[in-house]
């Protein structure tokens, strides 16, 4: 029985590119075959709990704009929230969802109470998942909103907060395993600092390394088969966050011997805030072997904070999916919408419309990327550009059999005086525009 | 015999804080003892060749503003440039200087000719060093200005450019060793990309890893005892540079097994462009054990490019030197001014005045930092803030003897419900203001 | 009788530069004479209600960290808040305070109820002002926090919101006049847009122009003698705010015939977010004749949002006060701390310490600026730099008596071929460093 | 007879969306009718001289990459450059071109010599224009590259530079008039400052106001019928440029009584650097009645300097042309490509390919914008959103017949308590995505 929040909502249909009905898909057909795989399996869409169902619409200068019947801290509120959430998941046809503990359970007064609430709601969500067929892409613990975490969770100067956080993560990993979540994510919203004046950077990094090692140890202990993912973000809420970007996380993982155990969940907006393009972070994660999953948002380019908008620029998204597909596509990961409605978008159907637009753009982007791959539109010119490295002397420079002295002799002997060749950037940009 | 470029310049004297003569030091006394060491030995000042003597004052919208009698590409020009440079080094009393090959030798038409020019000028500089007592802080190769490097040096798609670059680095390492340079630096101005569309990121990172390994192998082979330093910068001239920041370089070094072989030369302006404070990059390099040297510039906070100004904000510089001193001070590194005059500052004495101001500010900053250390002004509150970690249970959480389950039991048993404590940021900021 | 919130707080004493007691002033002596005027009269400090007493410590990723006994929406809560606020004002010895209506009255369910609450609290504040001698620097209306303002106040697409906002501003102007506030400020936190797709820019600018004209008309009608001030900010909370910066506000004022009626309240952090230095905005407001007052904060240079920190960089503050003094100092305006504690600074005395540090830095900055003015340290070189304009031909080029043709003839006749002269930036920067 | 630079180049043909030939248009058909007008007349394309033919490929860290046979300072070089330029204009079928004096004449040693060179080349260009049918969109003077302008042109502290600049502008206006240029543009690359310490802001603004008034006076005197345009840019090369953005220019024009005489030439990249979207600047210029022309570039969002790339993001460009069309389309202005090849794109045909891609994207963007206008896709929802203002009371609030008091009475009487309505941002974004 429907909650009625979305009226008498049904499954959003595919109606083709000419449809003007805002409650239809124009591009996303789950069963469309692309590169030999169904589109749904390529994209692995997930909707998130927090922005769509837990966030009240507040910003630093204003309070709640959304008036949702489930706002409150009782278990009944939590169940109503879940009911509406699954109505949305089902209507959209997203195969996955994601949550923080705090999104879906009432907030209690102690760790024990939180754990009980979590278990009650885990059971409830499990039933809804069984009934709907919606699966869990990932679970995570919110270790940043409550004031106890104001100075960090794993990196808190107070070991009691470290302990509280560790215990909370354990319960969330348990919940994720129970719900067959395919990944467990850590985003360290307060793992960083406001000022170096009160911060022992080295000590805090060591705390964080130990914490993550415990997570991996526990994963193996309980036989959890999902992936552990870290979500990089450079700053906000803190001045500096330790998981700044993909490169930083990679260095951290190596330092603590975890580079084969942990992957990254990359968000477009976080990439932008770190001074990178989204496709850069994806390409780098692929190169380093730590690509996991994506949060497919959009960040306003002129805003210096995390705007978490629904994505809508197809050419940019095509370049992102190009990197995803070049790396072999998603394994355990997927396309999560860590996107929130603008706080002025207060109608119930705005929630549907935001997701529909995002899913349609993802479908367009992925199909464009797939076509570029099929045509070798970018990979052929690339192969040609680096073709010189296939020659024997070149290979010897890379494999270690020539050193600086050997190379100097080679340069002198052959009077090597390289002439530059065009990088062909505009030509390649035009090629991309044939596909988007 | 003087060139006369600076008139009849003498050694710039220390004249005390009340001096209004622009050609005196007001704070920098080389022999002043600070924390048991001479100020000169703490600061280890170096002036650079390129900005002060090789750069013509051009910017993207305008050409040469400086008219220097040594601008030209003959060996005589190069010798005159060296004569004037050493007059400045001597007048300022900086114990060190730094150079790129291209700064100090004429640019020839082949690798062989460049090498010959380099050798001639290395000999000439060696004589001037002997005569003046000025030493070489570091040497480096310019692998970014000539059009042959437009698509990268070590990361070029063309193996001939890789070879040319490797051979050039060998000659520059040889020159640095001959001149007893205390460090050899690599800044990869073109090691990065303009667009991912024409770039094989993974391949280029591998090329760069191999290149750096060759540098380290050659260092050991020739018994060079200086440090190898990488200088991080996030972008400019390229859209994305592979040596983005300290964290990125650290991850790269680990990946190629070089984290104990190579350190970083950190520039204030590059930190800013990467979205970090200077002190962050210094603190992180200390925490990761890869701190080497600094370029003590200033970047305009409202400009999105590398402004390379002479430093002048003492409170900020005090925080930077605080990190340097906390890490034990400079070993092989020093304080290099990678600073250039504004292009409107076309008088000869502007060169002196820019350096004098920078050196005075460094002296003030370092002395303030030293006083904070002597008073434990910041370290005492820090110790207290993390004191909880000295307790036994806390230590066991960190040393691996407790895991998530053990910690959960501990939280439940003791009903741990941590109360936040003030971070005291404003109090600490006020303390710093007692010293600057 | 004290509320006890600050313990048994007394007036913070001046104890000199060597004091290590965090609850003393080290530089600020209200009665010190500077340029013939008491320091207190130069600086005209004000503390604000909102950040220190109304803000709960929340940010986009976390909730309340401060636990204040007056948090609540009853009149008793509001009175307790006022009691504590005036204890702080008195302890600090700030001669002024500032408020939004929403800061100091309970939020009611209708305009009428809000007006009644405002009147009750205005009376209460009036009594406290009389008792303490603390005066009102400015009052303002909060037209941005409540959800009714989510799409703007004066620029709302709904004329009812325009009406509600206008009526609210009237009540706040009345309250400000009653309390003898020396200025009335408008900050249009929601006057802007999230997306141009739903925005009629021209229409909204016209609404805003009419709104401001009504404010000015009403000011004259009631004989209010304070100044009307607009506070520019480029963005946040909206994507684009119409009062972007000083130059934008000036164009807007001229367009609606208000450039002689309205001035600007300039905040350091807003200047930074607009891509300007603080001193730029001050200098420009002086040049345009619309300088009013300042919010003396600090914005983190690496954060893309409004961090509203207590100021602590004396060299930067000296340059700001230099502009203030060059423009003749404050008339009706003053130095307001629109600064908030970091959300981790949860102790009561953090409130005092934050303000003490800011006030001390202001005192240092203003005294340095005054000394530069007394010495003509910057104005003499400036006069010399532009001296050529004192010649007759130069004057004729400016006064309109020569046009392009006349000037061309002059250039040809005299074969004018100007040689550049050094801008002396480094020299001037060194001069500033003699004073800070 | 062809120079052969582009081989045996012919007019680039339209070949339809499926064409894979890089030297064909896929979308741009000049004669296609859109909103009752030929596409060519809508877009009014212009190619620029400077980036394509005068810029050597240098950047702050590297020198020339392009090797063009016309690089040099003889009149023969200048004629060859013109020959090749017109070959490109003709091949592309752009109806217009633009130039700075310095782009197309050799640089001489005096004002008189420059004027003579300008006249020779103006004659030569005139012949080429007659022969080819290519027209001049705008001319301008380069008052920023030569060292004499290092401290400004109109705003220079030295009145001789002011005079030299004024005389130069006169000659360029003469040349533009002679070539029937449809606009005359001023971009003040050095009109701004590097530091306020050596700058009298007010005086420099007055100089600039007088300068612009002389330009307008001369325009009327010689009966020049084109438009005078200012091109805003916030910074680079200077730290702060006086023509920061559209709003700033508008305030400046009003201050000097020129708001009906001068319009703006808006560049996408400059908008971005000022913290605005391109469509914001266009919408604002329309609202203020000063829209003139556009430079249709693209700026890299992660680079803090002017990257001047060829545009390639169709969805963004559609929003820009939507604003252009909403304002009635171009009058004297047009779509200029102030775009440069990446410095690695050193092949001759890269020049063609860059422009072809840009022109195709413009055609796609404009057609999408036109379709949205025909369908009232965005204007209908907008009209509805503001519909409340059509009511009588609303109108009276705007027309001045109600003031704050009247509105307060109205609010009280009707107990106005406005309820927010959804801003529908996501819905509108999805609508746009139906067209791009």
Image (spheres, coloured by chain):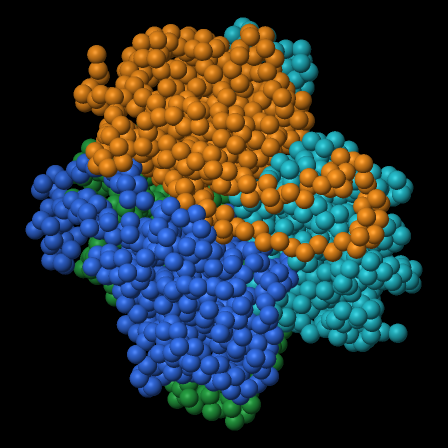
Chain colours: A green, B blue, C orange, D cyan
Give me the residue at 60% from left, 59% from top: B59
- Give coordinates of residue A299: x percent, y percent: 49, 47
Which residue is located at x 78 percent, y 60 percent? D110
Quarter occupied by residue B291: bottom left
> What is the quadrant of the C terminus of chain C in the image?
top left
Compared with D22, D198 (above or below) is above
Q: Residue at x 32, y 76 (%)?
A: B226
Which of the 4 image quarters holds residue D354?
Answer: bottom right
Q: Residue at x 36, y 56 (%)?
A: B14
Res C430 visible: yes
Does B243 appear above or below C374? Answer: below
- In the figure, residue B310 lies in which quadrant? bottom left
Say whether residue B413 is left or right of residue B133.
Answer: left
Closer-to-camera residue (C28/C108): C28
**Residue A273 location in percent, x, y?**
45, 50
For this view, does B288 lie left or right of residue B406?
Answer: right
Q: Is residue C430 left or right of residue A135?
A: right
Q: Is D71 situated above or below C242?
A: below
Residue C370 at what x, y percent from top left? 44, 33
């Amino acid at each position: 029985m429907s909650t009625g929040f979305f009226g008498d909502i049904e499954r959003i249909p595919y109606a083709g590119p000419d449809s003007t009905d805002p409650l239809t898909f124009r591009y996303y057909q789950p069963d469309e075959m692309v590169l030999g795989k169904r589109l749904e399996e390529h994209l692995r869409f997930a909707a998130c709990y927090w922005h769509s169902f837990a966030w009240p619409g507040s910003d630093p200068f204003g309070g709640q704009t959304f008036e949702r019947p489930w706002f409150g801290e009782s278990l009944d509120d939590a169940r109503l929230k879940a009911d509406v959430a699954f109505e949305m998941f089902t209507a959209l046809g997203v195969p996955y969802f994601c949550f923080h503990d705090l999104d879906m359970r009432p907030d209690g007064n102690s760790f024990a109470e939180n754990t009980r609430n979590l278990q009650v709601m885990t059971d409830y969500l499990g039933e809804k998942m069984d009934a709907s067929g919606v699966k869990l892409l990932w679970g995570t613990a919110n270790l940043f909103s409550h004031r106890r975490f104001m100075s960090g969770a794993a990196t808190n100067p107070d070991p009691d907060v470290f302990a509280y956080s560790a215990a909370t993560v354990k319960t969330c990993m348990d919940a994720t395993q129970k719900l067959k979540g395919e990944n467990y994510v850590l985003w360290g919203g307060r793992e960083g600092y406001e000022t170096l004046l009160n911060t022992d950077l080295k000590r805090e990094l060591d705390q964080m390394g130990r914490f993550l090692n415990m997570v991996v140890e526990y994963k193996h202990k309980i036989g959890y088969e999902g992936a552990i993912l870290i979500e990089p973000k450079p700053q906000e809420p803190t001045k500096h966050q330790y998981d700044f970007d993909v490169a930083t996380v990679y260095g951290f993982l190596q330092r603590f011997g975890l580079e084969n155990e942990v992957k990254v969940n990359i968000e477009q907006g976080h990439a932008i805030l770190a001074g990178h393009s989204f496709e850069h972070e994806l390409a780098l994660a692929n190169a380093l072997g730590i690509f996991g999953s994506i949060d497919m948002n959009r960040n306003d380019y002129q805003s210096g904070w995390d705007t978490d908008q629904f994505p809508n620029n197809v050419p940019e998204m095509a370049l992102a999916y190009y990197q995803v597909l070049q790396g072999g596509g998603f394994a355990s990961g997927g396309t999560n919408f860590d996107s929130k409605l603008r706080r002025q978008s207060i109608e119930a159907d705005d929630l549907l419309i935001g997701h529909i637009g995002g899913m349609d753009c993802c479908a367009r982007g992925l199909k464009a990327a797939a076509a570029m791959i099929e045509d070798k539109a970018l990979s052929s010119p690339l192969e040609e550009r680096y073709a010189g490295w296939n020659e024997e002397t070149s290979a010897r420079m890379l494999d270690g059999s020539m050193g600086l002295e050997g190379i100097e002799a080679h340069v002198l002997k052959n009077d090597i005086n390289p002439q530059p060749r065009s990088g062909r950037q505009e030509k390649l940009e035009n090629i991309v525009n044939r596909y988007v």
